Image: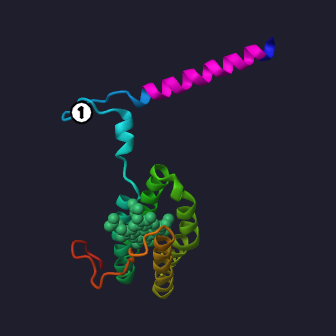
Amino acid sequence: MKTKFITLSVIVLVAFNSLYAMDIANTIIPTKHNKTLSLSDMAEIQPGLGTIMMEFGHRFYITYYAAKASNWELAKYEIDELIEAQEVAETTRPKYTTQLKEFESAFISKLQNSIEKKDWELFKKNYEQTTNACNRCHKENEHPYIQYRLPKEAPKYLKMAL
Ligand code: HEC
């Protein structure tokens, strides 16, 4: 009798919970331009891996020239921001989380270390290894045609050497 009651309570609770979750997902949050936008629609349009990767390419590139110009603070800033972008991808595209975390601990952390030490020779070595790891991950995920390469010139819109 008691077990039956517990089972029934659990079923009711689970059903209630999923109905509640559905309800929340369907909640309309109207904007100035769209009166039918639901929470679920909003969750769906959060940045996916492709968008985050454009940021990766950008920040990774700036990091190199900042370090080269001994602007170690800018180099550190760009890498910190790159990690933040990665964390967004881990939330919106969890299937890449393990690979991204491994990439961070095996390569990005070394790059951070050479930035902390302000060691340009070590940085260059780590940068090359990280680049290879970036491109390996593209291959492993059926995008062998996406090969990052370092642009020949420093970005023009940011001052590198201070
Ligand atoms: C976890 C594996 C992984 C790692 C690590 C990784 N990438 Fe990617 N990258 C991808 C995938 C997958 C795509 C294709 C995106 C998609 O499918 O939406 C991509 C796409 C890209 C693109 C193309 C973006 C566009 O749409 O134009 C660039 C640029 C890029 N990555 C740069 C980098 C750089 C630079 C690094 C290293 C600092 C890096 N990636 C590390 C998996 C990875």
The residue sitting at 26% across, 76% down in the picture is: 155
Q: Is residue 151 visible?
A: yes
Q: Nearer the viewer, residue 102 or 120?
A: 102
- Kind of residue sitting beneath label 1: Thr
Q: Is residue 100 left or right of residue 65?
A: right
Q: What percent of the width, then of the height, locates residue 92?
A: 45, 50
Question: Label 1: which residue?
Answer: 31
Which residues are the magenta region?
A: 4-23
Q: Is residue 24 left or right of residue 160?
A: right
Q: What percent of the width, then of the height, locates residue 76?
A: 43, 69
Asked which quadrant contains residue 143, the reply is: bottom left
* Farthest-out residue, left: 33
The residue sitting at 49% across, 54% down in the picture is: 90
Q: Is residue 76 visible?
A: no
Looking at the magenta stretch, what is its main secondary structure? helix
Ligand 1: does it lie within 8 Å of the C-beta at label 1? no
Determine whether the residue tagged by mark 1 lies in a helix, strand or loop.
loop
* Farthest-out residue, top: 1
Whether residue 10 appears in magenta in the rendering, the answer is yes
Taking 20 as reference, is 160 above or below it? Answer: below
- How many callouts does the rendering have? 1
Whether residue 7 appears in magenta in the rendering, the answer is yes
Q: What percent of the width, then of the height, locates residue 145?
A: 39, 75
* Farthest-out residue, front: 142
Taking 18 as reference, is 134 above or below it? Answer: below
Tell me which image quadrant ligand 1 sits in.
bottom left
The residue sitting at 38% across, 79% down in the picture is: 64
Q: What percent of the width, then of the height, locates residue 109?
A: 54, 70
The residue sitting at 81% across, 11% down in the picture is: 1
Q: Nearer the viewer, residue 153 or 149?
A: 149
